[in-house]
Every structure is written in C-alpha cells, then in structure tokens.
C-alpha cells in the first residue's frame, strides 16, 4: 500500500463517522500496514497530517499493535 492510498483510506474512515469504534479499528489496521511497509516515521506523519489524535485518539510515536 502506498502512502497516498493509505491517506485516501484514512480520510474515508474519518469522513464515514469518526466517533465509531469500527472506524478507529479500520484506521489502526491501515496504519499497521503502513508501519509494516514504510516504518514508524510514515505512520507518525499520517497521524499528524490527518490529526488522528483528535479524531481517533491515536498518538504519534505510538507503536501500532493489532
């Protein structure tokens, strides 16, 4: 998965209903895939760029464990 595709999918999760636990879980799965392919730096960049801390309470620097 490319970073652009991950960004697109994460935006979809944000727009579909940011309060839902299902959307948070989906976002975590997307970030786990990014972490595996591109590393923690790419994950942290997406978290900051999309403000996932305020939307899903996912913090930069936090290792994504699924």
Image: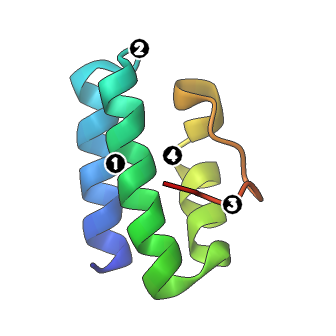
| Cβ atoms under marks 1 and 2 closer than 8 Å | no
Total labels drawn: 4
Q: Disc 4 designates what residue?
A: 50
Numbered label attached to residue 63: 3
| Cβ atoms under marks 4 and 1 closer than 8 Å | yes
> SS of the residue at dot 1?
helix
The x and y percentages for residue 63 are: 69, 60
**In the image, is 12 to the left or to the right of 11?**
left
Q: Disc 1 designates what residue?
A: 10
Q: Marks 3 and 1, how far apart in space? A: 17 Å
Q: Marks 4 and 1, how far apart in space? A: 8 Å
Q: Of label 1 and label 2, which has the lower sequence position?
A: 1
Q: Of label 4 and label 3, which has the lower sequence position?
A: 4
> SS of the residue at dot 4?
loop
Q: Nearer the viewer, mark 3 or mark 1?
A: 3
Q: Of label 2 and label 4, which has the lower sequence position?
A: 2
Q: Vertical placement of 26 versus 37: above or below? A: above
Q: Vertical placement of 28 versus 25: above or below? A: below
> SS of the residue at dot 3?
loop
Q: Marks 4 and 3, how far apart in space? A: 17 Å
Determine the image quadrant of residue 43: bottom right
Label 3 neighbour load within 10 Å: few <14, some 14-19, many 20+? some
Numbered label attached to residue 19: 2
The x and y percentages for residue 2 are: 31, 80
């Amino acid at each position: 998965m490319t970073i652009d595709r991950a960004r697109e999918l994460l935006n979809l999760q944000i727009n579909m209903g940011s309060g839902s636990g299902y959307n948070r879980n989906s976002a975590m799965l997307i970030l786990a895939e990014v972490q595996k392919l591109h590393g923690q730096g790419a994950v942290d960049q997406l978290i900051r760029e999309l403000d996932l801390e305020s939307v899903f309470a996912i913090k930069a620097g936090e290792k994504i464990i699924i």
